[in-house]
Amino acid sequence: MRYPPRRAREIGNRVLYIYQPGTVSDPGSGPLHRDEYIYKENNFDGVISAAYDFRLGKTRHVFKTGVNYLKKHAFYDWEVLPIVKGTNSTVPVELIPIQDWGNYMSMENAGNSLFYFKQDYTSNKFEAKSINKGGFVMLDHKLLPGLRVVWGGRAEYFKLDTITNSASLLRDKNSKIFFEEKKDWYFLPSANITYSPLKDLNLRASYAKSAVRPGLMENSRFSRYNPNYGSVVRSNGVSSTLIDNYDAKIELFPGAGELLSAAYFYKYFDKPAEYYRIDNENNGRGYITISNSDWAKVSGWEFELRKSLGFVYDGLAFLKNVYISGNFTLQKSKVRAREVQYEKTAAGIDTMYYKYMKYPRALYGQVPVLYNAGVQYAGKKLGLNISLNHSGYKTFITGIEPSYVEYERPRTQMDAQISYRFLQGKLETKLNMSNLLDAPFRYFINDPTTYELKPGNEGKLDLEWSDKYKYKFGFSEKFEEGYMDQATNRLVGDRQTSTRYTGRTFSLSISYNF
């Protein structure tokens, strides 16, 4: 049973919550309904691979090849039964507890009863299948002293078919899913070169092309309320995302178990999938849709350190087993977004095209700043580890206007682990402790009170947000609590949408090695 938003009435010292049924004239599933959802997925997966080592002169080589096959077949059935009342009903629902509504569903007088109002789009199904298969060839060459080259390619086939794709809402019955795979087969090459001019120094450079395939339900017309987003989630159709990955890295190994590295990376995404908030119905709530943007670029730097404290003082032997570690990542991203536009031609034919946004924005889910720091003690029996992990601002839901975009505020989490070995190392216990600071996930939206119309744009239509508006002094995309406007007695600042606490987590594991 799904309970809708309730209307509260205060009577004396009590608050009475009133549930309202739908009406026979109310399209859709109504505000109150009983639901059943059944999802089944059958997967068939197979992988075969082989490797052959050989020598050419004084050089060593490895040849690897393999094939894979993955077939998915998904079935999703839903039954949504709205509870409604007739147009002339006199059932006093405001005075009847909801658990007693069944006493008024006898249908002796249909016009004066509560009843389940079944419709075709509230009782329907989705069925789809996909095939992902391919083969790869890879060569690993150990050439000159300190030079290693690994390269190869993968040919991959992907095909997704929706057999039955019914809408779950009346307003979606005429909606379409656009699945725009350019072709079925793709060639995905890769190469990695490692050169070690010194024993403890590596220079690396690599390139790889990869593909991220959509899930079956991501191309379903089933609209559902997702409590994680606090919104209805729909799909406009999701196709594959192709990614070109480039990176260069320097690694220095000062001692056993020690590392100092710096890396630069660049990624190009062709048709990245993102979660958009859209308000085509102008109801102030909108909905979230999953669809592909045109392209995205991500580039950044990553630094990593792991060092023993044995160099601090030779007189304390345990310091050799104490390590400090850290990782710091800086990255920036930009996306060319697009919107689906629908029009009818003069001949009455439905057409679809994309409207491309002029101003790039950050990629959905990307975090500009990430870092972690930790201290570890690795003794023969006792092990201790404590780490601090921080992530900066992240786009949680994107959109074409700030009032549609939801961000996650920076978050810092502390984790720890204590381990001990017994019985000459055969028995080991581990106590894991996560989120010791009880750090919550906090979300916000740039409220319209934080930006204003640019001079000269009064009355102009069809302008992108960056052309039409600007942030007020002291405000930006980052969170600002703001201030109380004395003239209007209204808060000017960002709107906090939700805060989610996951709590602290403790787990104990025991393992025995025979």
Image (tube, rainbow, N blue to C red):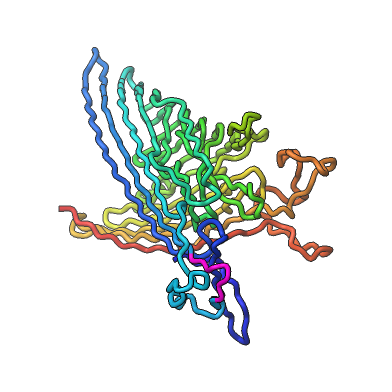
Task: Name the foreground residue: 428 vs 176.
Answer: 176
Image-quadrant location for residue 43 = top left
**Can residue 214 be spotted in the picture?**
yes
Residue 53, x across and y down, in percent: 21, 22
In the rendered view, would you say 457 is above or below 249?
below
Q: Is residue 380 left or right of residue 423?
A: right
Which residue is most to the top?
57
Task: Name the foreground residue: 9 vs 374.
Answer: 9
**Main SS of the magenta segment?**
loop
The residue that appears at 33% across and 52% down in the rendered structure is 378
In the rendered view, would you say 186 is above or below 110?
above
- Position of the N terminus by quadrant: bottom left
Residue 360, x across and y down, in percent: 64, 35
Residue 431, x across and y down, in percent: 33, 61
The stretch in magenta equals 83-90
In the rendered view, would you say 404 is above or below 31?
above
Which residue is most to the front?
109
Q: Is residue 218 left or right of residue 321?
A: right
Which residue is most to the left?
514
Q: Is residue 415 magenta?
A: no
The residue that appears at 38% across and 24% down in the rendered structure is 185
